[in-house]
């Protein structure tokens, strides 16, 4: 039998055992810490750069949006404002920044804005012999012979701002706006009204117009009658005859517009402009008519009706009872309409005195405007003497209502006897309208959206009123 040897595992050295028990050495820990710090610093640098880039992009987006907003604001301006420093002044007046230099703040960033405008002479319709004011440079070349070189206005908006690191950035956009007159016809550059508000008894209103090269200027007034034409080159005078106050054929008080439009040598029209003239030479005339009388359908009231004034500056009307003595303006007069002296309605044409004196009496009406010192001013009076209550007329009969073009159309039979001045229309038991004359028909052009009940009464020449007719119902 051979010798047997036991197999044993080698025992670790004492140094190896110490290392396994105590962990990493100090040198290893320091090296690992340095690697960690370098990695963290790299990540922080990347984050800082990303945040800086995001902020820069945000500022650039805000600047781009701002310059677009300014360009759109420029395009909304009057064509004549797109020159010199007017673009800056007009846009600042609309709340887009302020100051000089022009600055606007958006998202905590201050942007500096610069606007420059010039006039572009398009060679497509030939060039002007003399370059227009503020012509864009460099100028195009081409044949001359254009009577108006102001074809377009070119405005450039530039927005500058500093980035966080101090680097200056800018965004620029340019817009080209065509001349409203097509760049073909002449243009009114300015106008002056000799007397914007005419208070003295003068017989004409004068406007001085300045234009680019033109052959004539045609004008028209919104009074429906006055118009004319003036000859010239770049300066024109229009004289609007308004007559003498009190002549009966004068232009009545109110606000008017005079429209001027220049024409070139080839009869091409330019852009029109309007001048305002206010005529205020006298107190209002008396209303053209006043009618009325006792209405005894329900108790006793006095109904009054008048025709409105033709003046354009009427604030409203005052209807007054002349007092027991029937004399106008002697201190015992009582205002009937409106109930409050200063609540005036310019469209009012009727009044009801709910507590009139019995029998014959006198009323009068005055129109009210504003004097040159802006204070309310009463005009000439129109007087009406009415008698006692007349016999009431008979009611109309046979009221029917049908729908015509989605509107209720009423018709009825006239009373068998008695005179008819007009008919009153009642809707849902409330006085609503009246007919213009004695025709027994009426169309309600402002119907209600639900069921309505109509009735009609007869009114005679003394304004007395009949009973209500039998009702008629209308459904939309």
Image (spheres, helix red, strand yellow):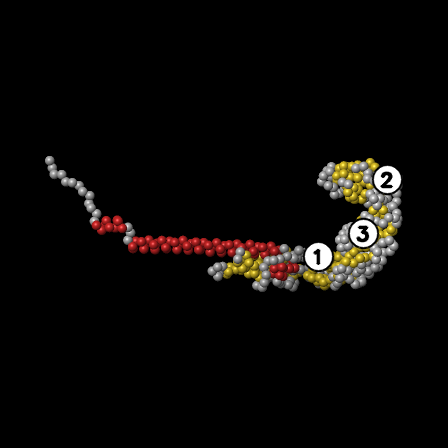
Where in the figure is residue 23, as x and y percent of width and height?
Answer: 28, 50
Which one is in front in this view, the residue at disc 3 or the one at disc 2?
3
- Marks 3 and 1, how far apart at CA: 47 Å
Q: Are marks 1 and 2 in contact (CB under 8 Å)?
A: no
Left or right of 447: which side holds 414? right
Taking the spot 47% from the left edge, 60% from the top edge, the residue there is 165
Q: Quadrant of residue 116?
A: bottom right
Residue located at (59% from left, 61% from top): 98
Front: mark 3 or 1 = 3
Tell me the tag on residue 336: 3
Residue ID for mark 1: 272
> Which label's residue is closer to the chain start, 3 or 2?
3
Q: Nearer the viewer, mark 1 or mark 2?
A: 2
Mark 3 neighbour class, 10 Å CA radius: few under 14, some 14 to 19, many 20 or more: many
Q: Which residue is mark 2?
A: 394
**Is 33 in front, or is 54?**
33
Q: Which sits in the foreground, 174 or 397?
A: 397
300, above or below 402, in the image: below
Q: Gap in Å between the C-alphas at discs 3 and 2?
A: 29 Å
Earlier residue among tags 3 and 1: 1
Q: Residue 410: horizontal and vertical position, in percent? A: 79, 39
Q: Is residue 19 above or below residue 115?
A: above
Pick the front one: 346 or 265? 346
Q: Earlier in the sequence, mark 1 or mark 2?
A: 1
**Residue 113 at what x, y percent from top left?**
56, 60
Residue 282 image-quadrant placement: bottom right
Q: Is residue 393 visible?
A: yes
């Amino acid at each position: 039998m051979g010798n047997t040897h036991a197999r044993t595992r080698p025992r670790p050295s004492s140094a190896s055992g110490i290392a396994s028990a105590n962990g990493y050495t100090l040198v290893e820990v320091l090296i690992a810490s340095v690697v960690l710090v370098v990695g963290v610093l790299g990540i922080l640098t990347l984050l800082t750069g990303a945040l800086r880039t995001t902020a820069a992009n945000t500022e650039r987006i805000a600047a781009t949006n701002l310059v677009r907003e300014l360009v759109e604001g420029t395009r909304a301006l009057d064509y004549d404002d797109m020159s010199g420093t007017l673009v800056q002044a007009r846009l600042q007046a609309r709340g887009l920044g302020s100051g000089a230099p022009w600055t606007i703040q958006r998202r905590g960033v201050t942007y500096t804005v610069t606007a420059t405008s010039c006039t572009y002479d398009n060679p497509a319709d030939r060039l002007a012999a003399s370059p227009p004011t503020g012509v864009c440079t460099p100028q195009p070349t081409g044949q001359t012979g254009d009577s108006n070189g102001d074809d377009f206005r070119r405005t450039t908006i530039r927005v500058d701002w500093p980035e966080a690191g101090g680097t200056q950035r800018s965004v620029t956009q340019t817009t080209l706006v065509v001349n409203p007159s097509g760049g073909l016809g002449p243009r009114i550059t300015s106008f002056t009204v000799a007397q914007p508000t005419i208070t003295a008894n003068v017989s004409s209103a004068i406007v001085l117009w300045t234009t680019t090269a033109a052959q004539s200027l045609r004008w028209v007034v919104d009074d429906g009658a006055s118009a004319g034409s003036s000859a010239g080159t770049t300066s024109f005078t229009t004289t609007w005859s308004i007559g003498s106050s009190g002549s009966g054929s004068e232009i009545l008080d109110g606000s008017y517009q005079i429209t001027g439009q220049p024409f070139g040598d080839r009869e091409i029209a330019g852009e029109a402009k309007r001048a305002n003239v206010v005529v205020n030479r006298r107190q209002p005339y008396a209303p053209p008519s006043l009618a009325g009388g006792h209405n005894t359908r329900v108790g006793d009231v006095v109904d009054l009706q008048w025709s409105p004034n033709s003046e354009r500056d009427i604030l409203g009307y005052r209807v007054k009872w002349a007092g027991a003595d029937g004399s106008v303006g002697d201190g015992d007069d009582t205002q009937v309409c409106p109930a409050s002296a200063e609540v005036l309605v310019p469209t009012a044409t009727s009044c009801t005195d709910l507590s009139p004196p019995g029998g014959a009496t006198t009323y009068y009406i005055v129109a009210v405007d504003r004097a040159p010192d802006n204070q309310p001013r009463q005009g000439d009076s129109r007087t009406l003497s009415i008698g006692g209550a007349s016999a009431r007329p008979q009611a109309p009969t046979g009221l029917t209502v049908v729908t015509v073009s989605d509107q209720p159309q009423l018709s009825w039979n006239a009373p068998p006897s008695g005179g008819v001045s007009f008919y009153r229309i009642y809707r849902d038991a409330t006085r609503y309208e009246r007919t213009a004359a004695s025709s027994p028909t009426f169309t309600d052009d402002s119907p209600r959206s639900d069921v309505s009940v109509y009735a009609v009464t007869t009114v005679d020449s003394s304004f007395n009123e009949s009973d209500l007719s039998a009702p008629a119902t209308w459904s939309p």
